[in-house]
Image (tube, rainbow, N blue to C red):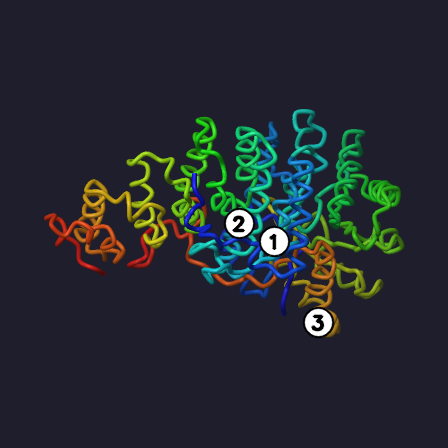
């Protein structure tokens, strides 16, 4: 699996000052020496390394990873490099399971690091994405939707990701694969969603256009009105 | 009057309480992990409870402009249940988290060997994670239980200013004052302290290292009893600065020793938490949910 679009080549190492980088390097070295330590070092990253908006400028981490997310991703990378794939997946599942919302978001931003070619690992990744997409916490939904690991979801599950984003107000431009995977079935779902909203006298999210406008020849194109 | 509520069990309270607390001047609070009334039977119940303290309850408080922190521990009462001894094994994950500002409530309920073992182990964890300790003192045989508590604290080697000994009264204040620990008083109708007795203690012992809380929970309690104590202090001639010291600066100074206080983020948000919006219904038009 390639790096997720939220990674986009941006690494914590490029954004941190020298002191924060040396603290992060030390944490990574500890985890490399004893991977189970990540259980207590991962939560401590915000106060020990850095926190604040990342390249997206969004301090909530919805529009892109925060500084602490990027630093935590480096710890995830160390775990993945230090353990066999299934053990790494188990460790990362625990980080998610015990994590607060910030820690969960960081795990989601780092899921693309896991080796999705191993079937058990891919299953674990799908479970975590599904968990995040069940919530209505827009920070988690956005991180799951933007993950490069969306490529492990089948088309139906991926379309549900898009629809969930539309529903809770996560910008569709964040969704991994929107350019390559949007199909007629997704367009039909978005049109039905728009129709349901219109019938209830409610506004239709403008982002619906990001899908429908890809199919200008299709009759449902004229359906929804922007709200 | 600004109030830092250093001990309240919001899990058992309503959103109306959050609203009235904010109106009374409460801007930050600490929710200690404790007994929830119904005994738990498994480690999983504790995990869900701890997750609520670092997650849902923090989110809920933020809706009302209050910064929520918590303390994490296996409480003395449930330390006696062998089915729950493994709770001690999951504590390190939680003690590493932002917003977890102490190990607590630890201490004694009936002063059993199981309670002492859990207490000693958790004092060690506090040292390991460089966290303050919030100690519950027993309702029965309180004075002896408090003496026993102070012995264990001394043996642990933890600095006394890192320890808050709570639920004190007229019979236990002197020994804790002498120990150098921070002194906590719960203003709790009927069974603990009331505002006027609290004012008498402050008049006698001063405001240094003194912390006042409501300890409000599922029992007969009042989340505004810190406010009432502040008013009683003013009526008795204490200055506004004295009141601010007891109701804000003292608890902030104590919990700041964790390095984990999050006092800047108290604005409201419109988000929902893991599928549950406390609005319980439609979002404003144009904001799907």
Res. B275 in view: no
Tell me how far mark 2 sits from mark 1, CA to CA: 9 Å
Q: Name the residue that disc number 1 marks.
A: A46
Where residue B252 sits: x, y (%)? 70, 61
Quadrant of the snapshot with the N terminus of chain A:
top left
Q: Do the residues labelled 2 and 1 touch (CB within 8 Å)?
A: yes
To which chain does the residue with label 3 belong?
B
Residue A126 lies, in percent from the top left, at: 42, 34
Q: Nearer the viewer, mark 2 or mark 3?
A: 2
Find disc 2 in the rendering and name its residue: A102
Q: Measuring 60% from the left and 39% from the top, which residue is drawn there?
A: B36
The chain under label 1 reads: A
Crowding around mark 2 (Cα neighbors within 10 Å: few <14, some 14 to 19, many 20+) is many
**Where does the image place residue B172, in percent across and percent down from the top left?**
83, 50
Query: Which comes before the other along the chain, label 2 or label 1?
Result: 1
The vertical placement of A81 against B182, above or below, is above
Q: Do pointers 1 and 3 mark residues of a single chain?
A: no
Q: Quadrant of the C terminus of chain A?
A: bottom left
Instruction: Specify whether A217 is left or right of B107.
Output: left
Residue A121 point in image, percent of width and height: 47, 30
Q: Distance between the residues labelled 2 and 3?
A: 45 Å
Local crowd at mark 3 within 10 Å, few (<14), some, or many (≥20)? few
Instruction: Using the rendered image, report if marks 2 and 3 lie on a common chain.
Output: no
Which element type, helix, strand or loop, lies under badge 2?
helix
- The tag on residue B235 is 3
User: Which is more foreground, mark 1 or mark 3?
Assistant: 1
Please determine whether, in this image, residue A126 is positioned above or below residue A214.
Answer: above
Q: Is B243 in front, or is B170?
A: B243
Front residue (pair A214, A207): A214
């Amino acid at each position: 699996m390639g790096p997720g679009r939220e990674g986009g080549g941006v690494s914590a190492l490029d954004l941190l000052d020298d002191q924060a980088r040396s603290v992060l390097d030390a944490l990574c070295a500890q985890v490399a020496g004893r991977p189970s330590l990540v259980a207590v070092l991962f939560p401590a990253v915000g106060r020990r390394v850095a926190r604040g908006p990342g390249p997206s400028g969004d301090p909530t981490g919805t529009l892109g990873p925060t500084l602490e997310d990027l630093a935590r991703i480096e710890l995830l990378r160390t775990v993945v490099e230090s353990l066999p794939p299934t053990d790494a997946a188990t460790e990362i599942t625990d980080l998610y399971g015990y994590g607060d919302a910030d820690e969960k978001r960081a795990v989601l931003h780092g899921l693309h690091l896991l080796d999705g070619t191993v079937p058990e690992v891919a299953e674990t990744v799908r479970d975590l994405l599904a968990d995040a997409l069940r919530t209505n916490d827009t920070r988690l939904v956005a991180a799951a939707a933007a993950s490069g690991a969306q490529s492990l979801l089948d088309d139906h599950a991926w379309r549900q990701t898009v629809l969930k984003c539309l529903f809770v107000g996560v910008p569709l431009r964040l969704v991994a694969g929107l350019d390559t995977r949007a199909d007629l079935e997704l367009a039909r779902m978005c049109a039905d969603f728009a129709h349901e909203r219109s019938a209830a006298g409610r506004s239709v999210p403008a982002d619906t256009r990001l899908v429908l406008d890809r199919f200008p020849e299709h009759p449902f194109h004229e359906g929804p009105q922007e709200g | 009057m600004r109030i830092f509520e250093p001990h309240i069990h919001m899990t058992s309270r309503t959103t109306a309480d959050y609203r009235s607390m904010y109106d009374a001047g409460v801007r930050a609070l600490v929710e200690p992990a404790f007994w929830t009334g119904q005994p738990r039977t498994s480690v999983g119940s504790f995990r869900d409870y701890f997750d609520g303290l670092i997650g849902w309850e923090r989110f809920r408080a933020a809706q009302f402009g209050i910064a929520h922190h918590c303390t994490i521990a296996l409480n003395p009462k449930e330390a006696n249940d062998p089915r729950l001894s493994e709770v001690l094994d999951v504590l390190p994950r939680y003690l590493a988290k932002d917003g977890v500002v102490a190990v607590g409530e630890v201490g004694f309920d009936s002063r059993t060997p199981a309670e002492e073992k859990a207490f000693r182990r958790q004092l060690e964890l506090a040292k390991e994670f460089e966290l303050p300790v919030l100690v519950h003192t027993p309702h029965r045989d309180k004075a002896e239980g408090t003496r026993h508590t102070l012995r264990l604290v001394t043996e642990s080697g933890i600095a006394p200013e890192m320890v808050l000994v709570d639920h004190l009264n007229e019979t236990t204040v002197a020994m804790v004052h002498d120990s150098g620990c921070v002194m906590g008083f719960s203003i709790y109708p009927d069974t603990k302290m009331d505002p006027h007795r609290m004012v008498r203690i402050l008049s006698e012992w001063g405001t240094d290292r003194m912390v006042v809380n409501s300890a409000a929970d599922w029992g007969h309690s009042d989340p505004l009893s810190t406010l009432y104590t502040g008013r009683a202090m003013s009526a008795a001639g204490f200055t506004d600065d004295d009141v601010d010291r007891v109701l804000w600066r003292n608890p902030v100074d104590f919990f700041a020793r964790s390095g984990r206080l999050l006092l800047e983020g108290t604005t409201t948000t419109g988000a929902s938490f893991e599928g549950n919006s406390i609005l319980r219904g439609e979002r404003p038009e144009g904001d799907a949910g």
